[in-house]
Image (cartoon, rainbow, N blue to C red):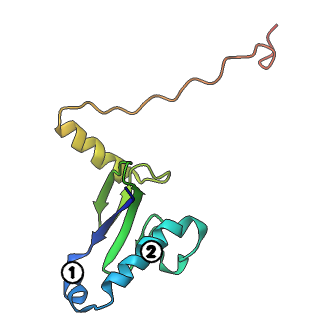
Amino acid sequence: MGWNSVAVILHDHLHDIEKDAAFGERIGRAVRGFSMRKHRIGADEADARTENCVSIGSLKVISQDHASGRQVVVVHGNTGVALWDDDCPQWAVDACAAALERKGYKVTKRKPKPSASRDPQQHGED
């Protein structure tokens, strides 16, 4: 089955892409760089705004998963983010919630779970 990558192509750079004979090679580097970003290999290509994507200027890889997995991404401001990233920004979560609400779902944030069962000895109780 293999792997899939999600990328944002910046339309403002289409004229450069059309002339770039090495564009395919650059996409390959970006995809491989995204795969290895957590190992700091290819870190020189990490986007200056976020380490959640790898940029080659006209294209940013923002998500990657096995073909049997699912990827949910939000694109905004010439970049994007996967919703399951630990540091997913609130604007992305809000966009996802708004999309679900337009489909008729009610979206609410879970209340924090209560702390573990109280141990009377820890609280000075007998």
x and y percent of residue 117 in the render? Answer: 67, 17
Q: Secondary structure at mark 2?
A: loop
- Quadrant containing the C terminus in the rendered view: top right
Which label belongs to residue 83? Answer: none
Q: Nearer the viewer, residue 105 or 119?
A: 105
Which residue in the rendered view is the most extreme toward the front? 1
Residue visible at 54% across and 76% down in the picture: 43
- Quadrant containing the N terminus in the rendered view: bottom left
Residue visible at 17% across and 39% down in the picture: 102
For residue 92, side relative to residue 84 (left or right) = left
x and y percent of residue 44 in the render? Answer: 52, 81
* Residue type at the position of mark 1: Asp
> Quick check: 126 above or below 102?
above
Q: Secondary structure at mark 1?
A: helix
> Quick check: 18 above or below 47?
below
Residue visible at 39% across and 60% down in the picture: 63
The residue pinned by badge 2 equals 47
* Residue type at the position of mark 2: Asp
Packing grade of label 1 (10 A; few <14, some 14-19, many >=20) is: few
Q: Quadrant of residue 55?
A: bottom left
Q: Nearer the viewer, residue 115 or 86?
A: 86
Residue visible at 24% across and 39% down in the picture: 100
Which label belongs to residue 12? Answer: 1
Q: CA distance from mark 1 to mark 2?
A: 17 Å
> Quick check: 59 above or below 100?
below
Which residue in the rendered view is the most extreme toward the top? 126
Q: Quadrant of residue 17?
A: bottom left
x and y percent of residue 21 in the render? Answer: 28, 91
**Mark 1–mark 2 CB contact (< 8 Å):** no
Q: Nearer the viewer, residue 18 or 89?
A: 18
